[in-house]
Image (cartoon, grey):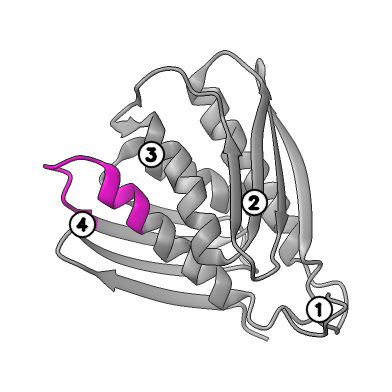
Amino acid sequence: MSRTATVSRRTRETDISCTLNLDGSGEATIATGIGFLDHLFTALARHGGFDLELSCRGDLHIDDHHTAEDCSLVLGEALRIAVGDKRGIARFGHAYAPMDETLARAVVDLSGRPWPVVKLGLQRPMIGTLACENVVHVFNSLAMAAAMNLHVEVLYGENDHHKAEGSMKALALALKAAVRVVGGEVPSTKGVL
């Protein structure tokens, strides 16, 4: 069973190509034009054990919003496609990720019902060239497009870089647990997700 997906999206604001392999080795080739966004998606691939290629040409002369949002939408769609009908997966995953003084927690349910709850407690306006409000938007958009419940929260911490990166690492570990193959049935009392 191939658990891969390739998704492209082209609008007047962005031109994105994404290939995701859930059964990879954590290799990532990311080029969004936003250094910290590349860093976050690289951490997701590495700690999730996914192979991820994602490139974007976006309207960064305007700001970072369209690129951050659209890359997350494309990646979320690729995740949704790659898990297929979800037959045999664990479905649920949770993880904690410490990063120096910060502790982040992520809990996911690949239920087909999108619902993000994101509490990062970011304080500064920017991390590199990515607005902190768009860090939160990355998680929200990813959850919506992947059709998953996502609860991610920084339990404590001081450094915004650590909060954002720790949260993405926690999400990566939670997704790694949720997509693992554990049986042959659809993990739902309904028989379908």
Q: Callout 4: few (<14), some (14-19), or many (20+) C-alpha neighbours within 10 Å?
A: some
Looking at the rendered structure, which numbered label has been put on residue 150? 2
Q: Quadrant of the C terminus?
A: bottom right
**Quadrant holding the N terminus:** bottom right
Q: Given the current orientation, which residue lies at the most extreme left position?
A: 61
Which kind of residue does numbered mark 1 sit on?
Answer: Gly
For the question of whether residue 60 can be seen, the reply is: yes
Amino acid type at circle 2 is Leu
Q: Which mark is residue 88?
A: 1
Image disc number at residue 134 = 3
Q: Nearer the viewer, mark 2 or mark 4?
A: 2
The residue where tag 4 is placed is 57
Element type at mark 3: helix
User: At numbered mark 4, what does the secondary structure look like: helix, strand or loop?
Assistant: strand
Q: CA distance from mark 2 to mark 4?
A: 27 Å
Q: Does residue 17 appear left or right of residue 181 in this picture?
A: left
Q: Amino acid at mark 4?
A: Arg
- Decide: marks 2, 4 in contact (CB < 8 A)? no
The picture places residue 176, in percent across and down from the top left corner, at 71, 57
* Residue name at image x 42 percent, y 61 percent: 73
Which region shows up in magenta? 57-70
